[in-house]
Image (cartoon, rainbow, N blue to C red):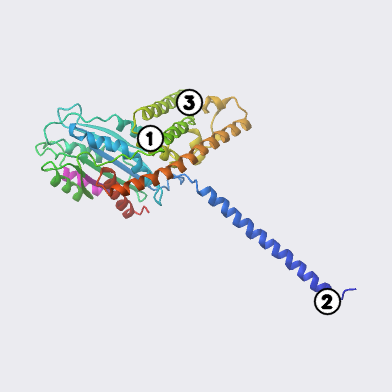
């Protein structure tokens, strides 16, 4: 028979063993749950913060669209998605809203055409696709009206600590000094800076009188002056991944589900389908590949999309009336409806994951090709350089 002391020691060892096992289970479980979260974070979508807390870049491009600016316009069409993606993937992961001001001169088909800032980047891009280099002829252009419209008519949000507002004036000709009835560019730049905006001036080519005017606008607008080649300096790099990314982007667009009133659903579906078709048929291959990446990382990539709203937490399925649901979901029971949505969300995630991996491979390919040719002063490089410094100064990491 064991002594009392032996029994006591045995019990102590037994209890300590149980305690150790419990601790190990807790630690292992915590570590595993941490790993699970990290696994999920590898596919985190950019801009998943609450709209009111999210840092936002509002950016307006005032573009000279006269006959000499064809190279710049085509360069912008190629690289605008890449510029946006670079900003969205920075540490602060800001939302990006873009506006456009196309400008020419008196006597042309228009003096300015203003497209107000929006986070509907497809709408921005399809508008940019329609720009053609036409008109002009005499060297000065109506830069006065263009800059004034960019500052006062572009639909800016109310200024706040979490919003950065940046203008890029891009052209090759100086303002008309004789248009005394139009706002002076220096006064407009001063007013923009007072409102918290930044104006950068990008000169294409080397026409006389432009450099001095552009430098003054940048100086008084608190921004940077850049000079780039007349043709924009943008070099398109075709990769083996572009076509597949473009196809995946179209597949992702096919998962779009509009919601709302019956009339609104039809209009939204038609609008999105028209944008998908226009971009697929008319956009440069590089732009389509970069757009695919944006659709994979941007939680605001589709306007009026049910799946996106549910994913972002801006919508709750139970809050929607049956008649507000997409037609294919209305007749389903709540349980079947939930399962169908989860199925579609899984399909969307699978496409996004494939886009993300191909985009990484594509980026590596492009970096190697650029290393062969060296750095080049171009529209996209100067915009990226300005944004990096100016967003950092605003507290965007």
Circle 1 Cα neighbour tier, 10 Å, few/some/many (<14 / 14–19 / ≥20): many
Whole-number angstrom distance, CA of label 3 to CA of label 1: 31 Å
Q: Is residue 94 above or below residue 337?
A: below
Q: Is residue 152 left or right of residue 360?
A: left
- Sequence-wise, the earlier of marks 2 and 3 is 2
Range shown magenta: 185-201
Looking at the picture, how far across and down is residue 308, in whole percent? 48, 37
Per the image, is 196 magenta? yes
The answer to which of 237 and 138 lies nearer the viewer is 237
Q: Is residue 115 left or right of residue 332?
A: left
Circle 3 Cα neighbour tier, 10 Å, few/some/many (<14 / 14–19 / ≥20): few
**Residue at horizontal 39 percent and vertical 48 percent from the top:** 55
Looking at the picture, how far across and down is residue 397, in whole percent? 37, 54
Which disc is residue 288 wearing? 1
Per the image, is 171 magenta? no
Which disc is residue 261 wearing? 3
Callout 1: helix, strand or loop? helix
For residue 115, what is the image quadrant? top left
Q: Which residue carries the number 2 mark?
A: 5
- Which marked residue is nearer to the observer: mark 2 or mark 3? 2
């Amino acid at each position: 028979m064991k002594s009392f002391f032996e029994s006591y020691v045995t019990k102590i060892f037994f209890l300590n063993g149980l305690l150790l096992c419990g601790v190990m289970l807790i630690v292992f479980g915590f570590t595993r749950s941490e790993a699970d979260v990290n696994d999920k974070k590898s596919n985190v979508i950019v801009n998943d913060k609450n709209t009111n807390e999210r840092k936002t870049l509002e950016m307006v491009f005032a573009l000279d669209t006269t006959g000499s600016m064809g190279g710049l316009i085509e360069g912008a069409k190629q690289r605008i998605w890449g510029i946006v993606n670079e900003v969205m993937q920075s540490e602060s992961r800001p939302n990006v809203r873009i506006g456009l001001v196309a400008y020419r001169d008196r006597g042309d088909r228009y003096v300015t055409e203003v497209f107000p800032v929006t986070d509907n980047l497809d709408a921005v891009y399809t508008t940019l696709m329609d720009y053609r280099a036409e008109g002009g002829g005499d060297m000065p252009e109506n830069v006065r009206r263009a800059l004034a419209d960019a500052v006062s008519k572009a639909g800016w949000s109310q200024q706040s600590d979490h919003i950065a507002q940046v203008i890029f004036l891009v052209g090759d000709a100086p303002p008309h000094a004789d248009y005394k009835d139009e706002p002076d560019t220096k006064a407009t730049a001063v007013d923009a800076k007072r409102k918290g905006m930044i104006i950068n001036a990008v000169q294409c080519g080397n026409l006389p009188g432009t450099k001095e005017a552009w430098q003054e606008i940048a100086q008084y607008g608190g921004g940077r002056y850049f000079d780039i080649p007349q043709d924009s300096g943008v070099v398109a790099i075709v990769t083996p991944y572009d076509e597949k990314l473009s196809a995946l982007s179209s597949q992702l667009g096919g998962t779009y589900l509009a919601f709302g009133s019956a009339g609104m659903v039809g209009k939204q579906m038609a609008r999105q389908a028209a944008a998908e078709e226009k971009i697929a048929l008319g956009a440069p291959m590089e732009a389509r590949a970069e757009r695919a990446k944006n659709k994979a990382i941007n939680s605001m990539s589709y306007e009026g999309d049910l799946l996106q709203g549910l994913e972002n937490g801006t919508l709750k399925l139970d809050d929607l009336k049956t008649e507000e649901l997409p037609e294919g979901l209305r007749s389903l029971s709540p349980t079947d409806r939930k399962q169908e949505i989860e199925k579609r969300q899984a399909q969307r995630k699978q496409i996004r994951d494939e886009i993300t991996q191909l985009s990484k491979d594509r980026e590596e390919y492009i970096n190697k090709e650029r290393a062969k040719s060296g750095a080049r002063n171009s529209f996209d490089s100067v915009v990226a350089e300005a944004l990096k410094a100016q967003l950092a100064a605003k507290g965007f990491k």
